[in-house]
Amino acid sequence: MTRLEQINEIIESGGYPSYTLSQITHAVYKLGASDYTEIPNIPMKLRIKLKEKLGGILTLKNINEVKGGQAHKVLFETRDKERIEAVRMIFHPDDDIHESLCISSQSGCALGCTFCATGAVGFKKNLTEDEISDQILYFKINNLKISSISFMGMGEPFANPNLFEALKIITDPNFLGISPRRLSISTVGLIPGIKRLTKEFPQINLAFSLHSPFPNQRLEIMPITKAYPINNIFDALDEHIKETNKRVFIAYILLKGVNDSPEHAKEIIKIIKERGRLSYLYHVNLIRYHPGPTISQFEKPNKESVNRFMEIIKDAGTNCTLKQSFGIKIYAACGQLYAKYETKSAALNEVKAYPTKYVH
Ligand code: SF4
């Protein structure tokens, strides 16, 4: 049962007026109340009942937190004891301050991309709509400003059937009320999810993680390519652009000696140019790979190859940006704090047996 359903049930069974629900949701989502007993304008008996039945307001508990420079990462535990991460990053574009929050949609992930710390964890669970939106609520309760939110933490958002309900809580003016234009969803290319987003939330920004333009190589590093081939994904992205007239971002993590060659850059250009008049609405975001605390077969690319890669794409007239990478010291890439925490816990507690997929 969701938080709203539970609150509704308590209100109805106690015979309270129906507007009580909006009083409670206003206090939770707008005023950032941190406890049900703090909610003003409702009877104390109801406040106590809510606390008794629902416990704390948040469905997540902060179990580890690391701050470093411009990044602040929180490891949360759900009530059923699974772990997820959220990272708040502060940018200073043009002397302005922009606080960006990166949240998770799943604990772990089943899709097994070979370069990804979350993929190495394996699938634990789909987050509920409350667990997804509570990552935002946590920062709100703690008075930490957020300018934009991206689903780039643990998990593939479109693989979670609760995602669209969570988006309603996040965007509905009666709840968190965040403008869809300030949200971004990053996907490895689950076409049904892309199509549903186009229809139901056309204003939400969309990013597609390509990571190799060559189907055989992409299949090797991202097994999901078998179910959703690159060409079919680009057809869905074209449709999204036609419907929304919005830019689509192509995320590309540069792995040294794997996908950072001029041939890869040229193939990306070729795919984008094939979009014809829509090609100018594709924007390539390059990300330099940083190995995490876990053993990895991949290495960070050197500056020269990154610059050369970007120049080739830009010279062809395609929009391309190198994303600022910070938070390396605090393991800000998705799944890295989780992996670090698990590894540390395993070392501290030799008695506890961890499945091999945790210890990498
Ligand atoms: S990159 Fe995304 S889809 Fe791939 S394993 Fe990691 S979390 Fe899952």
Image (cartoon, helix red, strand yellow):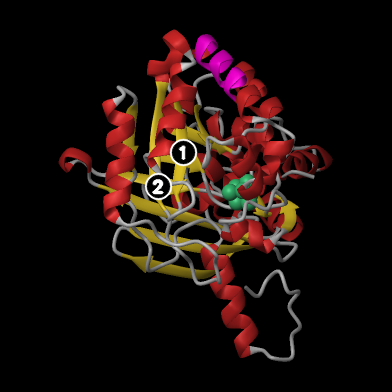
Pointer 2 or 1: first along the chain: 1
List the single residue furthest toward the left.
95
- Is 40 contained in the magenta span? no
User: Which residue is at the front of the view, 216 or 194?
Assistant: 216
**Residue 182 location (% of width, % of height):** 43, 32
Kind of residue indicated by mark 1:
Ala
Q: Residue at x 39, y 28 (%)?
A: 283
Decide: is 345 above or below 32.
Answer: below
> In what element is the residue under mark 1?
strand
- Is 239 contained in the magenta span? yes
Decide: is 346 above or below 186.
Answer: below
Q: Which residues are drawn in magenta?
A: 234-243
**Residue 51 location (% of width, % of height):** 68, 58
**Residue 175 location (% of width, % of height):** 56, 34
Q: Residue at x 58, y 69 (%)?
A: 339
Q: Residue at x 57, y 56 (%)?
A: 116
Q: Is mark 2 within 8 Å of ligand 1?
A: no
Kind of residue indicated by mark 2:
Ile
Q: Which residue is mark 1?
A: 251
Q: Is residue 190 visible?
A: yes
> In what element is the residue under mark 2?
strand
Q: Which mark is residue 327?
A: none
Q: Quadrant of the C terminus?
A: bottom right
Would you identify the image quadrant in which residue 355 lies? bottom right
Q: Residue at x 62, y 36 (%)?
A: 215
Q: Is residue 155 visible?
A: no
* Type of secondary structure dominating the magenta stretch: helix
**Residue 348 location (% of width, % of height):** 61, 89
Q: CA distance from mark 2 to mark 1?
A: 7 Å
Would you identify the image quadrant in which residue 309 lies? top left
| Relative to 206, 262 lies left or right | left
Decide: is 288 above or below 269.
Answer: below
